Image: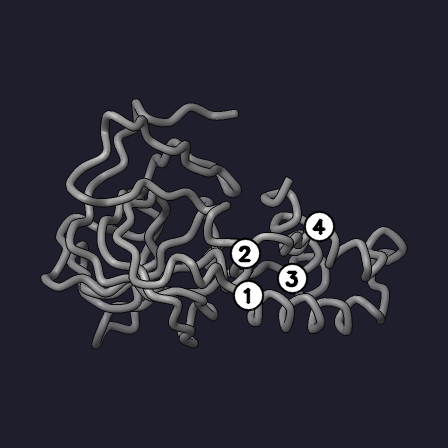
């Protein structure tokens, strides 16, 4: 399971470098943005795809597996590094983490998605804005990514730019994003991304749509 690979990488990173927390700061504000209180989600939780009858406009409902090109399997990449042979405080751990980070940052994208109009669910990691108004953020597939655990592969992070400032979009808020996706790479302070999305609409992902596994 791909999410298991991400969490395995995160666990390795945590073990090798201590607690990993990046602080998302608002524009012109050095205070860290806080994860919304009393969240029903735990680190690693993902969102289910919506139902076909809920599709809105001319957007193709897309899920995170589609953002990975055929044949790219992170499990296979991790197995090649023999992670199970690494013990606690193993000096090789830092070298392995560096290799994994390089693989993740250069993860290939699905070029068939370029310029497609899609609708995708995910969690928000703000890159700008103040309070609950943002115009630029990262969309990530599971709760805590880039904040409580290291960023996932670049092909599992979407750099979202909203035409108009989106309101009520807070850190780790679950949302649906509708717009045009582009296979454009970028480097942000919160992680490397393989996609950019021009968002037409950002909507809350309703809690009743989700249930824990």
Sequence-wise, which precedes: disc 4 or disc 1?
A: 4
- Dot 1: what SS? loop
Q: Which mark is residue 108?
A: 1
Q: Nearer the viewer, mark 1 or mark 3?
A: 1
Reading the image, the residue beneath label 3 is 18
Q: Which residue is nearer to you in this view: 125 or 4?
A: 4
- Dot 4: what SS? helix
Residue 20 pos. (x, y %):
56, 61
Q: Which mark is residue 75?
A: 4
Instruction: Give the CA separation, mark 4 to mark 3.
Output: 24 Å
Circle 4 crowding by C-alpha within 10 Å: few under 14, some 14–19, many from 20: some
Q: Nearer the viewer, mark 4 or mark 2?
A: 2
Q: Are marks 1 and 3 in contact (CB under 8 Å)?
A: no
Q: Which mark is residue 69?
A: 2
Sequence-wise, which precedes: disc 2 or disc 3?
A: 3
- Dot 3: what SS? loop
Q: Are marks 4 and 2 in contact (CB under 8 Å)?
A: no
Q: Are marks 4 and 3 in contact (CB under 8 Å)?
A: no
Q: Which mark is residue 162?
A: none
Instruction: Give the CA separation, mark 4 to mark 1.
Output: 15 Å
12 left or right of 111 in image? right
Q: Residue at x 21, y 77 (%)?
A: 28
Residue 36 pos. (x, y %):
31, 44
Sequence-wise, which precedes: disc 4 or disc 3?
A: 3
Q: Are marks 1 and 2 in contact (CB under 8 Å)?
A: yes
Instruction: Give the CA separation, mark 4 to mark 2.
Output: 14 Å
Q: Nearer the viewer, mark 2 or mark 3?
A: 2
Circle 3 crowding by C-alpha within 10 Å: few under 14, some 14–19, many from 20: few
Residue 173 pos. (x, y %):
30, 45
């Amino acid at each position: 399971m791909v999410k298991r690979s991400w969490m395995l990488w995160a666990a390795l990173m945590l073990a090798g470098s201590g607690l990993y927390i990046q602080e998302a700061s608002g524009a012109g504000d050095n205070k860290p943005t806080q994860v919304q209180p009393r969240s029903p989600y735990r680190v690693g939780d993902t969102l289910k795809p919506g139902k076909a009858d809920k599709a809105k406009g001319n957007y193709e409902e897309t899920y995170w597996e589609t953002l990975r090109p055929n044949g790219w399997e992170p499990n296979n990449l991790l197995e090649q590094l023999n992670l199970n042979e690494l013990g606690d405080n193993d000096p090789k751990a830092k070298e392995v983490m560096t290799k994994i980070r390089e693989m993740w940052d250069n993860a290939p994208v699905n070029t068939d998605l370029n310029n497609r109009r899609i609708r995708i669910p995910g969690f928000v990691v703000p890159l700008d804005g103040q309070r609950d108004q943002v115009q630029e953020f990262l969309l990530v597939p599971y709760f805590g990514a880039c904040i409580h655990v290291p960023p996932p592969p670049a092909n599992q992070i979407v750099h979202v730019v909203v035409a108009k400032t989106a309101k009520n979009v807070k850190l780790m808020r679950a949302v649906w994003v509708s717009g045009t996706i582009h296979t454009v790479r970028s480097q942000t302070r919160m992680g490397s991304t393989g996609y950019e999305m021009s968002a037409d609409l950002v909507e809350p992902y309703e809690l009743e749509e989700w249930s824990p596994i």
